[in-house]
Image (spheres, helix red, strand yellow):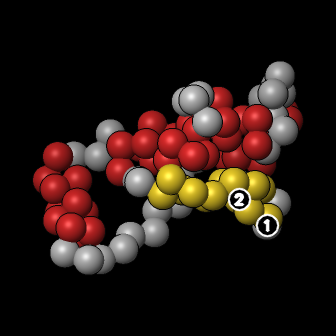
Amino acid sequence: MVPGPIKTILRGFVAGGGSIVLSSHVMALVEQLCDHVAVIDRGRVAAAGTLDEVRRGRSLEERFVRLVNAEGAGVKELAWLSS
């Protein structure tokens, strides 16, 4: 996903006390790089906390789908993801 050198630079920045805000619908990327997450649905925070707190024993992708009420949705219903 994210090339190794970029991950190294980002992790070094964070280790030095910096913060990075990442916005993505690619949950695998979020799980690789983030230790705290917030899922925002239609302008409201649906969940926020550490990765484990938000995942609640599931994958982040599964939780995201549940949190935005998209379970069983087809392509048409998820069209907002492409905007």
Residue 1 placement (x, y as % from top left) = 32, 39
Marks 2/1: CA distance?
6 Å
Q: Is residue 64 above or below residue 14?
A: above
Residue 15 located left or right of residue 44: left
Circles 2 and 1, Cβ within 8 Å, touching? The answer is yes
Task: Give me the disc on residue 69.
Answer: none
**Quadrant in the rendering for residue 45:** bottom right
The amino acid at mark 1 is Gly
Q: Residue at x 51, y 42 (%)?
A: 52
Q: Which residue is mark 1?
A: 43
Q: Which of the two residues, 17 or 82, is positioned nearer the viewer here? A: 17
Residue count near mark 1 (Cα–Cα under 10 Å), binned few <14, some 14–19, many ≥20: few
Location of the C terminus by quadrant is bottom right
Rendered position, 48 above or below 59? below
Residue 72 in the figure: left or right of residue 6: right
Q: Look at the picture and state if 10 lies above or below 57.
A: below
Residue at (79%, 44%) from the top-left corner? 68
Q: Secondary structure at mark 2?
A: strand
Q: What is the residue that sits farthest to the bottom in this orientation? A: 17
Judging depth in this view, the residue of 21 and 75 nearest the camera is 21
**Does residue 61 appear anywhere in the picture?**
no
72 lies left or right of 63: right
**Residue labelled with disc 2:** 40
Residue at 81% in and 27% down: 71
Mark 2 is on which residue type? Answer: Ile
